Image (cartoon, rainbow, N blue to C red):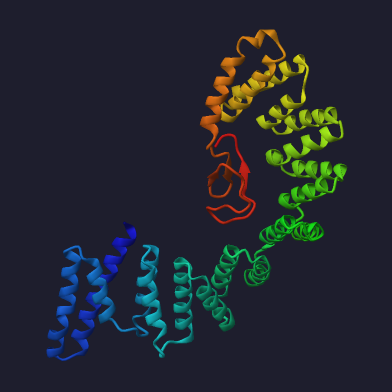
Amino acid sequence: MYDLLALLLLIASVLGWILGRYSKTESQQSVISQKPIYFRGLNFLLSEQPDKAIDLFIESLEVTAETIETHLALGNLFRRRGEVERAIKIHQNIIAHADLTATQYAAALLELGQDYMSAGLIDRAENLHLELINMGFYLKPALQNLKEIYQQEKDWEKCLKIASQLSNVTGQSQKIDSAHYYCEQAEEAIKIYYLTDAWSFTEQALQMDPTCIRAILLKAKLAQQRRDYNAAIQYYKQALAQNPNFFSETASGLIAIHKQLNQEEALIEYLYELYTIQHDPQILLALAELETSEKKLADIELLFQAHLHEHTDLLTVKYFIALLIKRSTKSKNFANSQELLKIIQQALDQVAKDQQKYRCVKCGFMSNHLHWQCPGCKRWGTIRFSADC
């Protein structure tokens, strides 16, 4: 609504400018011949026919040094309204004029490149932004747009190159993004069993950003695949020491390895310590899976109850019911409640099936699974597990 109002005001003012310009520079006969442009355009606006007013404006107003900013603004408004074809037409019309200064030409080129991006014409958009970089104009937005283009194409080598250039131009670090580009290459290598290459990419990621959780988790996964279990445990623990919010991404690996090594007791001790740092109900659920004695399960139930007093969320209740079902198999006191608990669990599973458990700490985007790049704000490494979603 705001864009439409701005567009209508822009058109009205431009039509008024047309009238004023011709009134000052042309003969009386020309004034009379040009006045209908203004009145026709105004009539279109008043009769709620803005499209016809726009077409009249485009036909009437030549691209000159005095009007180019108006043309650029109109094209920008079209793109924001989703009318990309009109935006392209306007910006192509600007570029077609040979009397533009280099700066004006570059401004139109940037706008047209963004039009092509909006239209999904990626190759054309790439070429225009590369031309801008070669010209030395609008380097920051051109590089930012190219980075977005190459991310869409999953061309991580080009992303790394552009990130380096962008860092030099802006003075702002691109290390976090670059580390994720290496991680993307590592994951692609893992899919085709190029495990040596994958390990090398994780090393490069950590050289770029030593705090990259994703690279550490990939190292844990690779170590686990080659059965270097002690190394894998250390990588998982390193990730959790750095950020306990990633327990959901480490739990299955840690449990599988410790069971493989018959070291469940060591893991239980570690998880109790971890829970004192990060009161994550998933840690309690993992403990409930590992513990076998009725007394230990009763202790975990008390921890769940204390957690629920502080955080009454669906996932914690769901995990708590899972614990009670396990206890029902161990204790006669719960035996009669087992069927009821299973019914409750099924209901909770249905409700929680599509619950959004991850949230971006920058823009608030929520999802039911982890994205390493936020689909909302496009930042890397900003999404975390959150039971409160």
Q: Residue at x 59, y 30 (%)?
A: 315
Question: Viewer-proximal residue, 305 or 181?
Answer: 181
The x, y position of residue 336, in whole percent, is 61, 9
Report which quarter residue 161 is drawn in: bottom right
The answer to whether residue 1 is visible is yes
Pick whichever, 223 or 92, lies toward us: 223
Residue 55: give x, y in percent of width and height: 26, 74
State which quarter of the image contains the C terminus: top right
In which quadrant of the rendered view does residue 82 lie?
A: bottom left
State the residue at coordinates (50%, 75%): 124
Vertical placement of residue 36 versus 275, above or below:
below
Residue located farthest toward the front when viewing the structure as drawn? 192
Question: Is residue 78 shown left or right of residue 373?
Answer: left
Q: Residue 63: name its quadrant.
A: bottom left
- Is residue 280 something one can see in this rendering? no
Please identify the quadrant where the N terminus is shown. Answer: bottom left
Above or below, comparing residue 196 to residue 17 in the picture:
above
Relative depth, front residue between 94 and 345: 345
Q: Residue at x 40, y 80 (%)?
A: 92
Q: Position of residue 114 (x, y in %)?
A: 47, 70
| Residue 88 placement, left or right of 142 | left
